[in-house]
Amino acid sequence: STVSSGINAEYGVSELKQKPLVGLKRWVSEVQYPDEASLRRECEQYMNEFNEREKLKIQHEKEMAENPDEDGWIMVTKSSKYCASEEQAVERKRQYDEKMNKKKKEILHLYSFQDREKRKQSIAELKQKFQEDKDKIAKMKAARVFKPY
């Protein structure tokens, strides 16, 4: 790059011999930022393509997990704990609640003697109710108000 008649062709310096733009100032003068609409379009296009690839990937993994290959093997895949639909989320929540309720019932009696005592107590209550019912029936028979049929 030669200087002819005071103009530097490479940097566009005028005849006044101004300093050439270098470094950050030159970069800022050359950079063109895209307008918001085109940037948004480009981002949305990329995200749509990404979502489509993810759907295909999940569909392929689901097919691989459900269908055996030529040798009869089924591919074991990692299942996500997150749900794709609201129905699946509700079903998973219900299963979790059932599991927790079952766990609470299991912890209710930690020792086997507690189970035995509980069983004895319930049998004693049943016997007591049976005896009360027998006494009640005997009183009704004595009063001749008892009509079984």
Image (tube, rainbow, N blue to C red):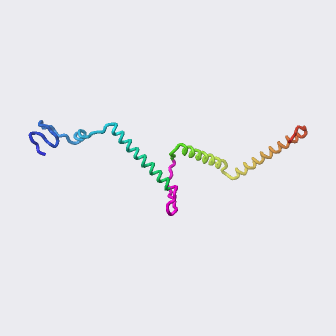
Specify the farthest residue to the front.
70
Number of marks drawn: 0
Specify the farthest residue to the bottom.
71
- Residue 37, by quadrant, is top left
Span of residues in magenta: 65-81
Quarter of the image where the C terminus is located: top right
Residue at x 62% of width, y 48% of height: 103
Residue at x 35% of width, y 42% of height: 42
Residue 31 on the magenta segment? no
Position of residue 84 measured from the top left corner of the image (x, y, whole percent): 50, 45
Asked whether, in this view, residue 80 is left or right of residue 128, the answer is: left
Residue 67 on the magenta segment? yes
Position of residue 125 measured from the top left corner of the image (x, y, whole percent): 77, 45
Position of residue 3 measured from the top left corner of the image (x, y, whole percent): 11, 43
Asked whether, in this view, residue 119 is left or right of residue 5, the answer is: right
Position of residue 28 measured from the top left corner of the image (x, y, whole percent): 25, 39
Image position of 27 with respect to 112: above or below: above
Q: Nearer the viewer, residue 104 or 83?
A: 83
The majority secondary structure of the magenta stretch comes to loop
